[in-house]
Amino acid sequence: QLQLAESGGGSVQAGGSLRLSCTASRYTYSHLCMGWFRQAAGKEREAVAHIAIDGSSSYADSVKGRFTISKDNAKNTVFLQMTNLRPEDDGVYYCAADYGDYICWVYSYWGQGTQVTVSS
């Protein structure tokens, strides 16, 4: 079954940048919609950004203008470029994917998560 492997988390000071990557493997159909979610300590998981195979994307209001999601369709890898990070961006970031040609708002497959720590 489809598997996701994330990388790129770490610690950064407020105002800094990080780039997360997530590569899909063992997929049975190459048209994948992918997204990023995050979960802060003591809070529910929330959607950060979504991207479709045609590059169309959607962002949470809290990250618009600071985060950019992109996708390498040939490698089925999704990236999340995060700039001007704030302490409230702190949390575990999860990659998600599903089969589809458009933005998926609900996903069947999830990565293990990567920690992003933003210090003030």
Image (cartoon, grey):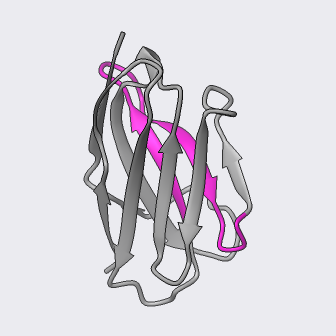
Residue 113 place in picture, x, y as percent? 29, 48
Could you tell whether 86 is left or right of 67 in the image?
left
Residue 117 place in picture, x, y as percent? 30, 26
Could you tell whether 41 is left or right of 107 in the image?
left
Residue 61 quadrant: top right
In the image, farthest residue toward the top: 120
Query: From the image, which quarter does the C terminus lie in?
Result: top left
Let me know if residue 105 appears in the view: no
Identify the residue shown where x is 70% and y is 66%: 55
Could you tell whether 37 is left or right of 116 in the image?
right
Q: Nearer the viewer, residue 19 or 101?
A: 19
Identify the residue shown where x is 37% and y is 42%: 93
Residue 45 quadrant: top left
Identify the residue shown where x is 64% and y is 35%: 60
Up-down relation of residue 106 to residue 45 (above or below): below
Up-down relation of residue 78 to residue 24 (above or below): above
Up-down relation of residue 99 to residue 36 (above or below): below
Query: From the image, which quarter does the N terminus lie in?
Result: bottom left
Let me know if residue 50 appears in the view: yes
Residue 114 place in picture, x, y as percent? 28, 45
Q: Nearer the viewer, residue 92 or 8?
A: 8
**Magenta-colored stretch includes residue 38:** yes
Up-down relation of residue 9 to residue 13 (above or below): below
The residues colored magenta run 34-55
In the image, farthest residue toward the bottom: 28
**Magenta-colored stretch includes residue 72:** no
Identify the residue shown where x is 56% and y is 66%: 71
Residue 63 place in picture, x, y as percent? 61, 31
Number of marks in the image? 0
